[in-house]
Image (spheres, rainbow, N blue to C red):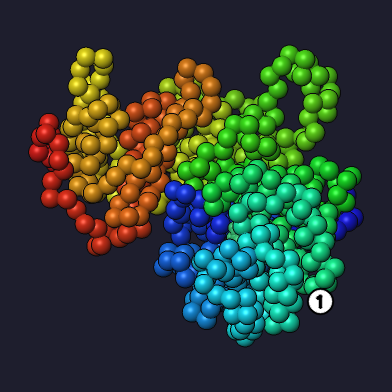
Amino acid sequence: MEREGRRIYIFDTTLRDGEQSPGVSLNVQEKLEIARQLARLKVDVIEAGFPIASPGDFEAVKAIAQEIEGPVIAALARINEKDIDRAWEAVKYAARPRLHVFIATSDIHMKHKLRMTREEVLAAVQRGVSYAKQHCQDVEFSPEDASRSDPDFLCQVLEVAIAAGATVINIPDTVGYATPPEFGRLIALIRQRVKGIENVTLSVHCHNDLGLAVANSLAAIENGANQVECAVNGIGERAGNTALEEIVMALFTRYDYYRCKTGIVTEEIYRTSRLVSSLTGMPVQYNKAIVGKNAFAHESGIHQDGVLKERTTYEIMNPAMIGLVQSNIVLGKHSGRHALRTRLAELGFNLTEAELEKAFQRFKELADRKKEITDRDLEAIVEHEIRQIPEKYVLQHLHISTGTHVIPTATVGLKVGEQVWEEAACGEGPVDATFKAIDKITRLPLALKSYSLNAVTGGKDAVGEVTVQVEYEGRHFIGRGISTDVLEASARAYINAINKLVYDVGEENLHYLDEVNNANARPGVAK
Ligand code: KIV
Ligand code: ZN
């Protein structure tokens, strides 16, 4: 049944503020894939990027603007002509484009960062919003660090922005400093004092430095805000942004209190969270509200008993509402393509024939080593192994010798085109040895920036999920791999990062090392 009540617009900034999370770097294909999923989730606005920031950001915003239908597509710009031109150049292809311009308004930012007076900032807002308006009908204005700005000055700035044509006024708590009552009061004050505010969308953008981003956004809604900027899994600068899934489910679950609705298809939340985690390489903490592994797990016997008798005794949300569906089908090594296709479709993965074939091969390999293949295993196969860019290097074989009193040694075979290249190397440990052997084949100057290993499911035959981040000439690439053997998963993850790098940088632009330094190495051999 359609709910009554005030409509809250969900502005998703996973691809812009979210991508500013330390260590996260998405390529154009990955951003497009997330944008497609955000469209299925039915967010109202996708902030696709900050086009002036890099050519990659520009291309991603352009590709999203050209392809994605449904949501408004926004591009961020500082309030100067060069930034605005570049943002418009990328976002103009969208059916419903938005230019999002910002400048700081707190004394601390104006004095130390901008080195501008209040009068100069006011003039820049007038000029910048008017200039953006010449390109685009829909212009959002953000006074950065609004929550630490002088409220009188802030209101003055907002009036100038509205008079110059802003259609959305967004109030950022840029450093996550505000508390809910205070932030709520600021929104109420803006609504009372700013001329023309009733004619624009009033938005908020909260950071989570004190863990208050969702609470502050809810306080803002109670005081009249009708757009919330948020990111999937709460990713973003430093401690992140308001978590999309939390704000949406808080409004949904506590409709009795807020009397507000969103247009989000909540059943897509879990899948969106998994996709973003997988592509950004940022794991979701186990106890994360709504989408964490433990969010619907009941450990205590009393709780389990209660839930078995009546789910609502200890569950305020039905897991099915976020798309967490349990299946009665157990897949194993006797399952065929049809069963796999059916289960994948139930999980929301509609693969092409070629993708299904690839998934089926990996499924069979896994089923040979693991009795029961769970939904999480299937998700891992699709997330890590299927949605892939062209692979220059394919793992052919891996042999590792390790132990307590031996030097860890790895022999790796990589298929490159029709040829298999083999190398061996020693290392501090078996993973190090494996990566060094791979380096000897690729001869790329790589630095390993991070390595993490997670068990996808429990049990002795659990699937290990490895995520690595490598640096090549100042750029970061994330690779993922899965296997019941964690060393194989490590090799797959490392090779995945290298393939992405080759794809993104382009073969013709790569720089190779003359030889890879390893005292114990033997010369490379093509077999
Ligand atoms: O946190 C912030 O102030 C921002 C603005 C650009 C909206 O991200
Ligand atoms: Zn921000």
Furthest residue toward left: 523
Question: In front here: 443 or 323?
Answer: 443
| Residue 142 at x, y percent in the picture | 65, 68
* Ligand 1's quadrant: bottom right
Q: Position of residue 128 (x, y in %)?
A: 60, 80
Q: Residue at x 72, y 63 (%)?
A: 203
Instruction: Sort mark 1 into few (<14), some (14-19) or many (20+) by Cα contacts within 10 Å.
Output: some
In the picture, residue 305 is in which quadrant? top right
Mark 1 and ligand 1: say if the CB distance to the nearest ligand atom is below 8 Å. Answer: no
Estimate the x, y position of residue 72 in percent, counting from the top left. Answer: 66, 67
Tell me the quadrant of the picture where the C terminus can be found. top left
Q: Quadrant of residue 474?
A: bottom left
Element type at mark 1: loop
Of residues 434 and 345, the one drawn nearer to the viewer in this rendering: 434
Up-down relation of residue 166 to residue 234 (above or below): below
Q: Position of residue 324 (x, y in %)?
A: 67, 36
Q: Is residue 245 above or below residue 222?
A: above
Q: Specify whether residue 230 is in view.
A: yes
At 50% from the left and 55% from the top, the residue drawn is 20
Name the residue rendered at 41%, 68% in the picture.
Answer: 55
Q: Amino acid at mark 1?
A: Lys
Badge 1 is on which residue? 195
* Residue drawn at the location 75% of the way across and 40% of the way down: 321
> Left or right of 302: which side holds 434?
left
Against 1, residue 482 (above or below) is above
The answer to which of 96 and 133 lies nearer the viewer is: 133
Residue 235 seen in render: no
219 lies left or right of 209: right
Would you say 248 lies left or right of 288 here?
Answer: right
